[in-house]
Amino acid sequence: MLNYRVKVMEDGICIMKKRIASEEYLLRAQKLTKKQTEYLYSRMGGKLGRRLEDQKIAPLEALAIQLEKEDEDLKEWRERFSEIKANKGKGDN
């Protein structure tokens, strides 16, 4: 599960929501090879990529967040694909 840092103003309005890296993924990011790191950077985009370019986030933290995001995406994809396979199997009968 992704962790977020949220800044809430006195009136209760949320003005900022940033992902933060968990310890588990920071450790995994430290163990990446140079080639694995390059592949991960190449898939990084959007706000995370901009935060890294603007030096608002440390490279290790950016890698950890990207790893965590990709794991979440893969988990969601597997769940959806499993549902599709189950529904397809029901339609064959």
Image (tube, helix red, strand yellow):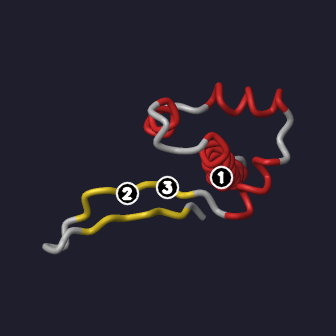
Q: Which residue is mark 3?
A: 19
The amino acid sitting under disc 1 is Glu
**Residue beneath the point at 37% across and 57% down:** 17
The amino acid sitting under disc 2 is Lys
Q: Quadrant of residue 79?
A: bottom right
**69 w.r.t. 10: above or below:** above
Along the line of sight, which residue is nearer the eye, 93 or 65?
A: 65
Q: Is residue 4 left or right of residue 38?
A: left
Answer yes or no: do the residues labelled 3 and 1 have beta carbons within 8 Å? yes
Alpha-carbon span between mark 3 and mark 1: 10 Å
- The label shown at residue 17 is 2
Q: Which residue is mark 1?
A: 68
**Residue beneath the point at 71% across and 55% down:** 26
- The label shown at residue 28 is none
The amino acid sitting under disc 3 is Arg
At numbered mark 3, what does the secondary structure look like: helix, strand or loop?
strand
Q: Where in the figure is residue 8, as x and y percent of width and height?
A: 26, 68
- Which mark sits nearer the N-terminus, 3 or 1? 3
Q: Where in the figure is residue 60, as x and y percent of width and height?
A: 67, 45
Q: Where in the figure is residue 88, as x and y percent of width and height?
A: 67, 47
Q: Residues within 10 Å of mark 3 (few under 14, many from 20)?
A: some
Q: Quadrant of residue 22?
A: bottom right
The N terminus - image quarter: bottom right
